[in-house]
Image (tube, grey):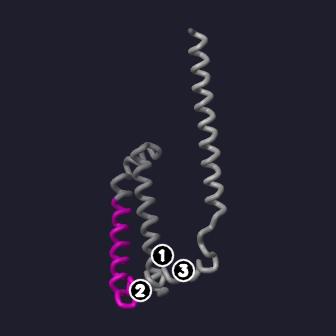
Amino acid sequence: MDSRIKYAGLIVIAYLFIRFVIKMSSYQTRVIETMTVSTVDNSAIATSVSSNTDKLNDTLLISKYRANYEDTIIQLEKAISIAILSEVVNNAVTISSDPISSDSLKAIANINQLKMFRESLNQSMIILDKN
């Protein structure tokens, strides 16, 4: 009786292993086919991107609302700068006492995210000036 249970267990394990191998090989085949099959016409990519950009540009009406967009970016930049200063001041003690604590690292990450957003706002202004 004991040996039959062992053999039954081995058969189940072998069956599961074979199913796993078959599933993985079919998954790999799908991945390889996806990488090799291209449904995009490469000669039309630039035209499509240009068309999409024109649609977005038409939606924004930059020439009409330029002043509003500039004011919005400037006000956001001020708000983010104040938020950065606030985060630095409010978390100075925590950061200085243990710069690698989880609370300090969260505060530092928040400050860095705000800085990156402010840089994005500056880039937005540069892009707005180019249009």
* Amino acid type, residue under disc 2 in the picture: Asp
Crowdedness near tag 3: few (<14), some (14–19) or many (≥20) residues, C-alpha within 10 Å: few
Magenta stretch? 57-86
What is the x, y in percent for residue 28?
Answer: 64, 49
Labels 3 and 2 touching (C-beta < 8 A): no
Q: Label 1 is placed on what type of residue? A: Gln
Q: In front here: 98 or 47?
A: 47
Residue at screen point 41% across, 86% down:
58
Rendered image quadrant of residue 115: bottom left
Query: Residue at 63% of width from left, 34% of height from top?
Result: 18
Where does label 2 land, which residue?
Answer: 58
Q: Residues within 10 Å of mark 1 (few under 14, many from 20)?
A: few
Relative depth, front residue between 38 and 98: 38
Three-letter code for the amino acid on which mark 3 is drawn: Ser
Neighbour tally class for label 2: few under 14, some 14-19, many 20 plus, Cα within 10 Å: few
The answer to which of 30 and 90 lies nearer the viewer is 30
